[in-house]
Amino acid sequence: MSQQGAALQNYNNELVKCIEDLCGKRDELQRQILIEEEDKHKLENEIRISSEKLAKINENLAKKITARTEFDRTISETEAAYMKILESSQTLLNVLKRESHSLRTKVDE
């Protein structure tokens, strides 16, 4: 019976050792989980901050594109009006030259 008691003691010692090994592995796994959860939270926060920055940039970009479009429209309208003024000036100059020539002809007669 002493042999059976010794064998039982060996089994008990091995069982305790296995349980301790499993607990050690579980503790190591828990430590890794905590580290990865912390990394996950940091990344989620960085993503949130980056998303907010991206939203602000997109908003500012949209405003600037709208302003540029308004500049383009104003410039185009101003250039068109300026061309009409130039054409009118040329027409006025031609009429003035013709009338001036006509008046000189009448004065010279």
Image: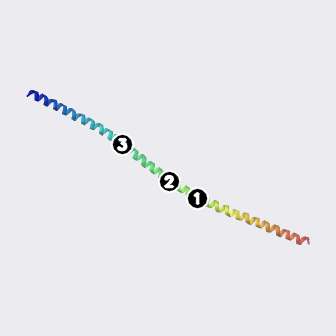
Among numbered discs 3 and 2, the one appearing first in the sequence: 3
Task: Please rate how many residues cluster around mark 2, counting C-alpha atoms within 10 Å: few if below 14, some from 14 to 19, many from 20.
Answer: few
Where is residue 80 drawn, in percent x and y? 67, 63
* Alpha carbon separation for disc pair 3 and 2: 30 Å
Which mark is drawn over residue 43? none
Q: Quadrant of residue 29?
A: top left
Report the number of discs: 3
Say which quarter of the image contains residue 39: top left
Query: How many neighbours does mark 3 have within 10 angstroms: few (below 14), some (14-19), or many (20 or more)?
Result: few
Residue at the top extreme, as displayed? 2
| Mark 2 or 1, nearer chain start | 2
The N terminus appears in which quarter of the rendering? top left
Tell me the residue that label 1 is attached to: 69
Q: Which is in the foreground here, disc 1 or disc 3?
A: 1
Secondary structure, mark 2, is helix
Residue farthest along the left direction in this orientation: 1
Q: Is residue 6 left or right of residue 92?
A: left
**Residue named by callout 3:** 38
Give x and y (percent) for residue 94.
79, 66
Residue type, mark 1 in image = Thr
Name the residue: 52% across, 56% down. 62
Label disc, if present, on residue 58 of the rendered structure: 2
- Choose top left, top right, bottom left or bottom right for residue 35: top left
